[in-house]
Amino acid sequence: MRSKPRLLIFDVNETLLDLKPIKVAINHTLANELAFDSWFSSLLHYSLVESVSGKYQDFDKIGAATLKMTAEKFDKQISDGKIKDILALIKKLPPHPDVIQGLTLLRNSGIKMVALTNGTQDVVKAQLEFAEIDHFFDEIFSVESVRYFKPHPATYTHVVKEMKASPIYTMLIAAHGWDITGAQRAGLMTGFISRPGKFPYPLAEDADMTASNILSMAKILV
């Protein structure tokens, strides 16, 4: 690690919040245990299509569109109302069991913490309030401020600028290899959370820190 971080940027979905309620709903509705993973990959894929092609759509709209595509992939029909009901679960996700303890430890150490998500500002605020972890963060950011999706470098540099910080003293903490890679290439330090089924990108540099969960990461940082 180059230096001790003064600002931590946390990814939200899967890093802090457990997507299991949505996973269960999608797999049940489409009657396939691979449906959720297929949908989530498509969601990330088409968000990048929007960024690369110079367009921007809200993440929830891309989520709905790609869920409809995923249903077609599995030869299922799904109504717009059902899609809306399933995706509404994004606002009612529990934090992973390690999150509150980890964030408490970090908050007590005095380090600044913010959240950054591909979702809209309204959604992420609702998410963190429901999970009862919103009070841990000095600020909550959405990529809609820059109209590019992570891992575009503009998303990370926007947060650094708004927080009047320096990239070399800022660390992104995330459970996604693509997110870690994007932050690295924007000049940030990185902390990879190796949750089950999550792996670093082999063509990127190693993260500055790796831990199995937020509490373990917090103990290393403190």
Image: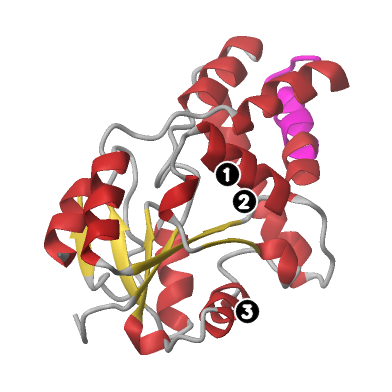
- Residue at 63% in and 25% down: 89
Can residue 11 be seen in this snapshot? yes
Q: Is residue 112 above or below residue 49?
A: below
Identify the amino acid type marked 3: Ala
User: Quick one: SS at disc 3?
Assistant: helix
Discs 2/3, front: 3
Q: Tell me residue 167's x, y (percent).
A: 42, 86
Tell me if label 2 and label 1 are in contact, CB under 8 Å.
Answer: yes
Residue 61 in the figure: left or right of residue 109: right
Q: CA distance from mark 2 to mark 1?
A: 5 Å
Which residue is more in the foreground, 186 or 216?
Answer: 216
Magenta stretch mostly in which secondary structure?
Answer: helix
Residue at image mark 2: 44
Mark toward the start of the polypeptide (3 vs 1): 1
Task: Report the disc number at residue 41.
Answer: 1
Q: How many marks?
A: 3
Residue that mark 3 sits on = 154
User: Residue at left 33%, top 84%?
Assistant: 169
Separation of marks 3 and 1 at Cα, in angstroms:
22 Å
Q: Tell me the CA gap for discs 2 and 3.
A: 17 Å
Q: Amino acid at mark 1?
A: Ser
Counting other residues with Cα less than 10 Å from the Cα at mark 1, is it few (<14), some (14-19), or many (20 or more)? few
